[in-house]
Amino acid sequence: MSRLLHFSYDILLEFSSPVGEHAFALRCMPSSFPGQEILDCTLSLDPQVPYTRQRDGFGNLLQIGRIGQFHDHFRYTLRGSARVDIAARQQERAMPVFRFPSAYTQPWPELERVLGQLNLPRDPRQRAWSLARAVHEHMAYVPGSTGVHTTAEQAFASGQGVCQDYAHIYLTLARQTGLAARYVNGLPEGEGASHAWCEVWLDGIWTGIDPTRCQWTDDGYIRFGVGRDFGDCPIERGVFLGLADQTQTVFMRVWEQ
Amino acid sequence: MDGLVRHTRQINQQLARYGVKFGIYKNGTFQERLFPFDAIPRVISHEEWQVLERGLIQRVRALNLFLKDIYGEKRILSDGVIPEDFVYRSPGYLPQCEGIVPVKGVYSHISGIDLVKGKDGVWYILEDNLRIPSGASYPLIARQLCRRCSPETFRQNPVVDNRGYGRLMRRTMDSVNTGGINVVFTPGRYNAAYFEHSYLAEQSGAVLAEAGDLYVRDSTVFYRSTQGDQRVGAIYRRVSDEYMDPLTFVPESLIGIPNLMAAYRAGNVGILNAFGNGVADDKGIYYFVPKMISYYLGEEAILSNAPTYLPFYPEDQRYVLEHLDTLVVKDVAEAGGYGVVFGSGLTAQQRQELAGTIAAQPRRFIAQEVIDFQDLPILEDGEQVERKADLRAFVLSSGEETVVWPSGLTRFSRNPHSFVVNSSQGGGFKDTWILSR
């Protein structure tokens, strides 16, 4: 069983006054791997500037470029289709670093006590699942309650957050119990904003788990990038010269024909 | 040598005039201090230097091979020589560098290796500095001034000329230059070592640049010169890894070059030293360097480490906790003489607290026997007194060869009771003479 999904992803950055010297690095193009075959994919930029494609240290596709001229907006648009079949996922080697804490996923002093109370199963798969349930139960999904710099510890303490925070807490817990786990962002089936979830390394296979929705991922998820945490694979990063406020409008859609 | 000593004041005045300063942060404010020069040189005999030279080259070769291995195959981990905790928990390990092979496979182009000479006459390695070690400019300019003040001293003594450092640096940069100009990249004049950055640029014939002078287009670095944009082939950068590219590392950095990492990854620019070297000069990894030497080179280490214990190993931990009163404990994440605690200087209660911290976070610390190192004579108010001193040797690795600069920075502590000689802790420096026969 596999599914053919179409996707569109539109980002518009608007600047309150013109900016220049704008360098950007995008990780918004999904790559093909067993279980996710990208059939076609186009990226268009406005202002139209050339960009270079590379792979970063985690294997993610990167699109790098620079807008030298002054501009008051930057729009990038992604269109494509993919065949997703999680049953076709194959065994891979895991970067060992995914077993260790990272900037957003540092353990905190009471963590061991929290884990102790959860009474976790020894079986890695069951443990991975129990942790997702625990995170889901502990957290309330409250948009705007956290920011891009919020760590797992902070989000856990407040009990509120968005998908990024759920993922960070999940990773902290999972790694502390000895699982290799990584951060994933991409597009889930439906409409709205991009999403973040996790992958746990079970029997050599990177297996998707979504703590925000409290489910194993299915054929409705398109993966952009992976990393130790959010900081390794942001979909868009940029720096520019200019004293401007920036507003961002995001719209994505993933549908089956 | 008397000729030199008579000119101490003059040389220090000249150093001040040339702006040989060292910036330190004290109580949160930036202060510029003169770096006091003592005219009595440290003298290293020809025979002694030959051993040091061979040992330093061996050590840096092994460290370069280690870095290549860590960011590539990781054989030393899979073979169980080094526990992976010491790599993956190290803040110096940058997974962003995975899979990148720098030009000619060189990671640490300019290494600063700190040594001390024990009272037993044996040289011990104190630490390796493979990121952006500073200090070569000070003995370089001091020698020049010494020669000017007292040329006869250098006619009468067989001192190896050290003034070729600029050429050596240039050769190292040229060897990894991908086509374009050489640049020394500085965070700017509020950096502790700004004098050094500008002086080394001048000596090596490179362009001194700051953020904003360089930019990346088509994965290639360009310098905005008065004659238009020039392609940059090699960058000797004196900015820490995490601030070098806001699109890869710390996003708030204003002193970096956006998308530099893309140019580096594409092989379009040589970066001296490579990103991610911090994983090899971590105080925890130091313990393993002799093992690296035998693992990669099949040789015995020529130069010894100070006797070191890793509380990470239960056996070592037991020893450390029992002998805290005689050991020096170092926090592996700190540098520049910070995070160094002498057990002998602690009260019983402080010692107990430290023992608790070590037991709770064993990976964070190393402990070493205090080496009773030789005192060197210095002049203080016209009197000759003895003070602790170390030596930073500079080892330059190009794609073709690894060489040791026949000189080095000898730093001394001005406090008679202190073993810590780091310039950030207010010490002074001396010229280092290598004798040619």
Image: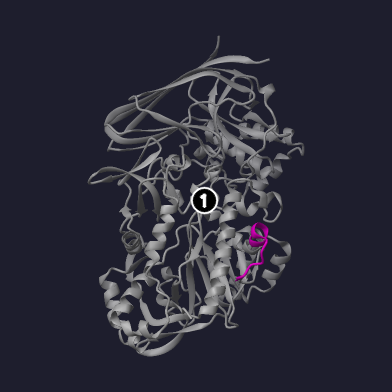
At mark 1, the secondary structure is loop
Q: x, y percentage for residue A12?
A: 37, 24
Relative to A107, is A121 above or below?
above
Q: How is the image coloured?
A: one colour
Residue that appears at 30% across and 73% down: B15
Relative to B167, is B158 above or below?
below
Left or right: B215 in relation to B432: left
Label 1: how many Cα within 10 Å (few below 14, some 14–19, many 20+): many
Quadrant housing residue A175: top right
Extreme residue toward the right, this view: A122
Reply yes or no: does residue B194 show up in magenta. Answer: no
Q: Which stretch did the figure color magenta?
A: B293-304
**Which image quadrant: the N terminus of chain B?**
bottom left
Of residues B393 and B178, which is closer to you in this image?
Answer: B178
Of residues A141 and B273, which is closer to you in this image?
Answer: B273
Of residues A224 and B411, which is closer to you in this image?
Answer: B411
Q: x, y percentage for residue B12?
A: 30, 77
**Residue where numbered disc 1 is placed:** B276
Residue B27 visible to the viewer:
no
Quadrant housing residue B224: top left
